[in-house]
Amino acid sequence: MAFEMIVNVIADLIGPLHGGEMLLTFLATSAVFSAVLIVVLMPLLQRYALARPNARSSHRVPTPQGGGMAVVAAAALPAVILLLLFGTDFKFYWGSGRSLLPILGVFPSVIVLAILGAIDDIRPLPVLPRFLLQGLAVAAVVAPLTFTGNTILPVPAWIEFAILLFAGLWFVNLVNFMDGLDWITVAEMVPITAFIAFIGFAGFGPIRALPSPVAIMAACLCGALIGFAPFNKPVARLFLGDVGSLPIGLLVGWMLLELANAGALAAAILLPLYYLMDATITLFRRLARGEKVWEAHRSHFYQQATNNGYSALAVSAHVFALNILLAGLAAISIASPSLMVQFACVLAGVILVSALLFRFSKPRLEIAR
């Protein structure tokens, strides 16, 4: 009886909310929960999860890591509550209801990567078993999309599965690789998740097929990262760690995959384009030099920027501003069904990112003089 009363109260609270109010409710709840969890966990992380400077690091003193535990938990909690209280059909704002099962299917993989990341933060794992477990987690997310008729690419399902598995594995790892500077993951992922949440709740443009669970998770992850941001601002008092960057990479990769599946492939490419280009170009350059690409390094463009006179705050501010521009291009690509417009938006995005990468690779003018 008490449980039913709680369900009815929450349903009454959620039911009248419109899209913007719903978005802000999920975002604010996750932000507060993330910040509170971090405060609770901080003494434990300071004692057992210190990240000591190495060849890859941008920090100079041991700093606690593992903040990703709070971020992932805060991002997942609202969706878990919805599942426990309302089952798999969430019918209060979306009328006929949208199944929450897509979230339930992603959770096991998120948990696996979080555990894997936590272990790796404490004691680095060998490369092969780490990639195998990551591959299994990504496969569990990709398979339902590719083998249920929801094709994104005009190729047989097994080929699409192989392509998306490779792309997903790369995306999870590049998010981990790029999480090497104060605020940079916040600057990258907050605009992406905010954009996906907005178009999911608002039904922006012709994209009305984006499942509502994707919008829920995007709003929750956005809020959780905002709650983490004060602790990670330069000079950071806390890092995400692999326990955060790996599952965040999986969650955002899943959201982008759902966005592409809803008919917005150009937007799904544009939103993470800075991370994609920085990490991929760096990988190929290191391969060309014959370096061991799995070892720690400082070759990313954002790392070069700090060597060239940019502060961590300046780098993250540049990345954030760029992502706002990329989100604008993504919105244009969604609003117009023209392939020419979408191609032009992607090309413009590539030019903008290339300009920033070039700028990061050169000394700041006031230092070069």
Image: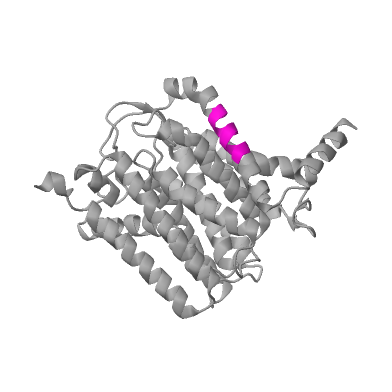
Magenta highlight on residue 35: yes
Colour setting = one colour
Name which quarter of the figure residue 47 lies in: top left
Which residue is rendered at x = 79% and y = 58% of the image?
A: 95
Q: Would you place residue 226 above or below residue 261 in this image?
A: above
Q: Depth check: give the residue in front, 204 or 60.
A: 204
Q: Would you place residue 183 above or below residue 361 in this image?
A: above
- Residue 302 drawn at (x, y percent): 29, 48
Magenta highlight on residue 250: no
Name which quarter of the figure residue 154 lies in: bottom right
Which residue is rendered at x = 30% and y = 40% of the image?
A: 312
Q: Quadrant of the N terminus?
A: top right
- Residue 173 drawn at (x, y percent): 42, 50
Which residue is rendered at x = 51% and y = 64% of the image?
A: 331
On screen, residue 134 versus residue 296, left or right, reads right
- Residue 53 drawn at (x, y percent): 29, 31
On screen, residue 10 versus residue 38, left or right, reads right
On screen, residue 86 versus residue 155, left or right, reads right
Name which quarter of the figure residue 323 lies in: bottom left
Which residue is rendered at x = 77% and y = 41% of the image?
A: 13
Instruction: Residue 297: tell me if it is visible.
Output: yes
- Residue 176 drawn at (x, y percent): 41, 46
Q: Would you place residue 52 above or below residue 164 in this image?
A: above
Instruction: Residue 163: tell me if it is visible.
Output: no
Q: Which residue, as the protein is rendered here, is positioned at the far left?
A: 369
Q: How many marks?
A: 0
Q: Depth check: give the residue in front, 98 or 368.
A: 368
Q: Main secondary structure of the magenta part?
A: helix
Q: Which residues are magenta?
A: 28-37
